[in-house]
Amino acid sequence: MGIRTSYSADTNFLTIAVEGRFDFSAHQEFRAAYEEAEPQPDGFCVDMSETNYLDSSALGMLLLLRDHAGGDGANITIENCSADVKKILTISNFEQLFTIK
């Protein structure tokens, strides 16, 4: 499991890639990825292309990112989800809170 970040100066977007299991063990690393970003981006992309598991603590971490990014005005996309991960996000009604691609 790991968290990788990449920043695009062109779009001022921070991409946070989650590898392996996205659960409570990723809490500190995930939070540091967006809180310690310099400069602070205008938006975030959470890349789930290498995520094979997602639990309720991960859903909570996504909500904390949303709060950090401005709540209802947050510009966050969740991309490259597997069918299983997308199903969990859909059941949790996260499509109403995030742009999921």
Image (spheres, rainbow, N blue to C red):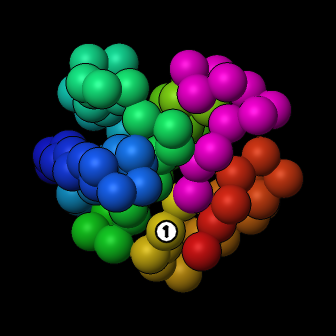
Residue sitting at x 84%, y 53%: 96
Q: Can residue 31 be seen by looking at this rendering?
A: no
Query: Which of the 4 image quadrants contains residue 69?
Result: top right
Q: Can residue 85 be seen by looking at this rendering?
A: yes
Q: Is residue 73 magenta?
A: yes
Amino acid of disc 1: Glu
Q: Position of residue 32 (x, y in %)?
A: 27, 21
Count residues near mark 1 (Cα–Cα under 10 Å), then give few for <14, some for 14-19, many for 20+. Answer: some
Taking 95 as reference, is 80 above or below it? below
For this rendering, which residue is in front, 19 or 16? 16
Q: Is residue 56 left or right of residue 34?
A: right
Residue sitting at x 44%, y 75%: 80
Write down the residue under mark 1.
79
Q: Is residue 42 magenta?
A: no
The residue sitting at the front extreme is: 10
Q: Is residue 91 left or right of residue 60?
A: right
For this rendering, which residue is in front, 67 or 40? 40
**Quarter that holds the C terminus:** bottom right
Residue sitting at x 29%, y 54%: 8
Query: Which of the 4 image quadrants contains residue 53?
Result: bottom left
Q: Position of residue 90 (x, y in %)?
A: 74, 64
Q: Position of residue 42 (x, y in %)?
A: 51, 38
Taking 72 as reference, is 88 above or below it? below
**Label 1 secondary element:** strand
Taking 27 as reference, is 50 above or below it? below
Query: Which stretch appears magenta?
Result: 67-77
For this rendering, which residue is in front, 42 or 48? 42
Q: Position of residue 74 (x, y in %)?
A: 67, 36
